[in-house]
Image (cartoon, rainbow, N blue to C red):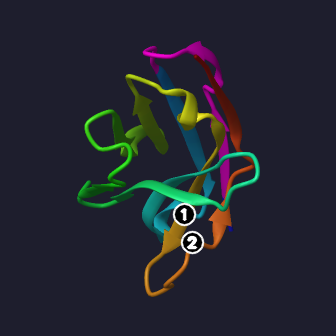
Amino acid sequence: QVQLVESGGGLVQAGGSLRLSCVVSGRTSSVYEMGWFRRAPGEDREFVADINWSDGVTNHAGSVKGRFTISRDKSKNTLYLQMNSLQADDTAVYYCAARRMFISTYDYWGRGTQVTVSS
């Protein structure tokens, strides 16, 4: 089992920045890839970014590319999402998720952290 706990959300003005963190515990050796997702009110869950836990290769959704950066610190078993130039439509609950090797879907999820951007 893998446990994920997010933190770092809050209320910020448009143009501001936040850094989300996700602490990974449990069978961390089984983690192959980690990602950030978000769900805005009334919307479907949306992919934000992912990172290969081993080699650090990243992917970012087009809507956040150039503004958000995913990273990880393996020594701290922590995943990060640096969010800059925040916009009102970035308002959502942000979730971190983990995917194990040979598993095609993310099967471990955190409870989420609320990010609210005021315009």
Membership of 8 in magenta stretch:
yes
Count of marks placed on residues: 2
Membership of 15 in magenta stretch:
yes
Q: Secondary structure at mark 2?
A: loop
Q: Secondary structure at mark 1?
A: strand
Could you tell me which quadrant the N terminus lies in?
Answer: bottom right
Check disc 2: other Cα within 10 Å, few if <14, some if 14-19, many if 20+.
Answer: some
Q: Amino acid at mark 1?
A: Ala
State the image coordinates of residue 117 (x, y, percent, origin top left).
60, 22
The residue that appears at 44% across and 87% down in the rendered structure is 102
> Is 78 displayed left or right of 66 in the figure?
right
Q: Quadrant of residue 56?
A: bottom left
The residue at the far front in this view is: 119
Q: Which residues are magenta?
A: 3-17
The residue that appears at 60% across and 26% down in the rendered structure is 8
The residue to which callout 1 is attached is 98
State the image coordinates of residue 64 (x, y, percent, origin top left).
37, 43
The residue that appears at 55% across and 36% down in the rendered structure is 89
Q: In the depicted view, which residue is nearer to us: 54 or 57?
A: 57
The residue to which callout 2 is attached is 106
Q: Amino acid at mark 2?
A: Tyr
Tell me whether the residue at label 1 lies in contact with that at label 2, contact meaning CB atoms closer than 8 angstroms.
Answer: yes
Seen in the picture, residue 74 relative to 44 is either above or below; the reply is above
Q: In the depicted view, which residue is nearer to us: 88 or 81?
A: 88
Seen in the picture, residue 72 relative to 59 is either above or below; the reply is above
Check disc 1: other Cα within 10 Å, few if <14, some if 14-19, many if 20+.
Answer: many
State the image coordinates of residue 97 (x, y, percent, origin top left).
58, 59
Majority secondary structure in the magenta region: strand
